[in-house]
Image (spheres, rainbow, N blue to C red):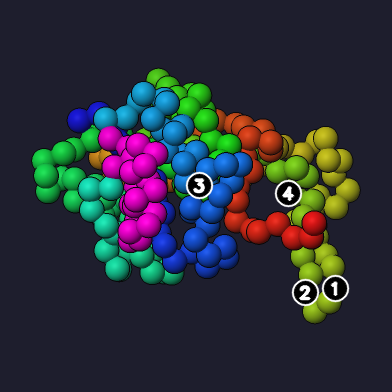
Amino acid sequence: MGNIAIIPARGGSKRIPRKNIKPFLGKPIIAYSIEAALKSNLFDEVMVSTDDEEIAKIAREYGAKVPFLRSKDNANDFAVLADVVQEVVGNYKKKNNNFDNICCILPTAPFVTSSKITEAFKKLVEGNFNCVFPVLEFSFPIQRSLKIENNKVSMVWNEHLNTRSQDLEPRYHDSGQFYWTNTKAFLNEQKILTTNSGAIIISELQAQDIDTEPTGN
């Protein structure tokens, strides 16, 4: 029982080739996720799910376990995160290793911290949630968003055309760092974000994701 950290890192990333192990401030970017998980002391197992031997080697060097390689079906462009997590849980179950909770930590979030992982776990348990993950507020009210159709601009929600920004409720989006989920609830619903989900709010500075390569000098 206990908790498992699953860090999904396939070898065939498209937007930035090999982005999981690209150097970032002196170490492979995946190292930050592994180190944050280990530092939290919350996990009975910190593992990397990958189909790639080089990623597996680097993951082990930084203290993670790679007890098996990911299947081809879950290493293609169409596999979703829930499929990967389900495969990992299933493989551990075959060895009679079961976990109460899962924390899926993405490998390209170098600003993830053990303190935020711990804060979210505390909320998961104390708030009786089935899933908790970090979110951040949109920098501008999404209710005032625009769309472009046939080269013409219009409001998405026309009823807010004259609503003052300060009168609009805050809206949030996924930070793309990690997801705590109760294993039983995940298996029942077959999705990471269950119907009983909570969140912790983080700042924009804490939520930088690495998904595009820098341009210019």
Residue type, label 1: Lys
Q: CA distance from mark 1 to mark 2?
A: 5 Å
Q: Residue at x 38, y 30 (%)?
A: 38
Residues tagged 4 and 3 counted as in contact (Cβ below 8 A): no
In this rendering, would 43 be left or right of 170? left
Instruction: Tell me how many marks there are.
Output: 4
| Residue 153 falls inside the magenta stretch | no
SS of the residue under disc 2: strand
Residue 115 in view, yes or no: yes
Question: Where does the image place residue 69, in percent across and percent down from the top left?
Answer: 27, 57
- Dot 3 corresponds to which residue? 28
State which mark lies toward you, 2 or 3.
3
- Dot 4 corresponds to which residue? 142
- Dot 2 corresponds to which residue? 149
Q: CA distance from mark 2 to mark 3?
A: 42 Å
Residue type, label 4: Ile
